[in-house]
Image (cartoon, rainbow, N blue to C red):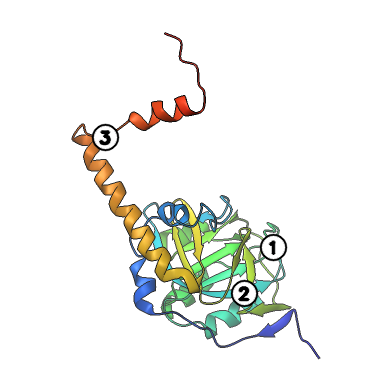
Amino acid sequence: MSNIGFRICKSVDRINPAIIAGFKGIAASNIADVMGRFRAMDHAIKSVNKPGIHVVGSAFTVRTHPSDNLMVHKAMDLAKPGDLIVIDASGDMGHAILGELMCHYAKGKGLGGFIVDGPVRDLYAIAEMGFPVFARGGTPRGPYKEGPGEINTVISCGNVPVAPGDVIVGDDDGVVVIPSAEAQEVLKSARAVQEKEAATIQAIYDGKWDRSWIDAALQAKGCEVIE
């Protein structure tokens, strides 16, 4: 008998930690650019922390009923240090999926943070403690603890598919998901973009930024220029 909708998969195929660590310091926007500008979560899923956040980790996924966090509690007990718990709560804003106490517990276990397709509560306290949390917003209304739900199955978070073990990068712009099987290739490309942008910034201040592409693009598209 299938137990779809109420099941826990304990094992996660995590990739080489060195590949995950390689994404530290690389902007989420640069990573999204090298994935065809896809794999970026919905713009509403934002950091509730103070500006300057940048978090990288392996996805530990949870699918839960929009008003319930029983499986989120279990996921915190199962996740490994550095894991980011990614929660599919269907984007519903009725009940907070987690709050300050759960963040303290997760922080004490060394978890990397939470990504929530839904709301959280205790926003000020979470921001002050500095534990990474990304969510659609906040509400004071708390959750139930009844289930059902799933742990470590493929979910949707912010309209992006997330599989257990995928690489998650979040910063002030939002959250991107890198499929684990392609993480090494994406890392190489994202580093190249980052290096190119650094060179462009230097060229701007040296007065050497080539702007000829703008007129070339306008001309190719048939734009009329009136003197």
Report the disc number at residue 207. Answer: none
Residue 130 visible to the viewer: no
Which of these two is toward me, 107 or 227? Answer: 227
Amino acid identity at mark 3: Trp
- Residue reaching furthest left? 206
Do the residues bearing badges 2 and 3 touch, measured as CB atoms within 8 Å? no
| Residue 119 falls left or right of residue 213 | right
The residue located at (32%, 53%) in the rendering is: 194
Between marks 2 and 1, how big is the CA–CA gap? 11 Å
Badge 3 is on which residue? 209
Q: Nearer the viewer, mark 2 or mark 3?
A: 3
On the image, the x and y values in percent for residue 186 come to 42, 64
Rate crowding at label 3 as few (under 14), some (14 to 19) or many (20 or more) other CA atoms within 10 Å: few
Task: Kindly state the secondary structure of the residue where label 1 is placed.
Answer: loop
| Separation of marks 2 and 3 at Cα, in angstroms | 46 Å
Q: Cβ–Cβ below 8 Å for labels 2 and 1?
A: no
Q: Which residue ends up furthest to the right in the rendered image?
A: 1
User: Residue drawn at (63%, 63%), measured in percent from left and top?
Assistant: 96
Query: Is 188 or 74 nearer to us in this picture?
Result: 188
Task: Assign a secondary structure to mark 3.
Answer: loop
Asked if residue 207 lies left or right of residue 172, the reply is: left
Q: Position of residue 149 (x, y in %)?
A: 70, 77
Mark 1, other Cα within 10 Å: few <14 / some 14–19 / many ≥20: some
Vertical side of 109 occupied by 31: above or below: above
Checking the image for residue 90, the label placed there is: 1
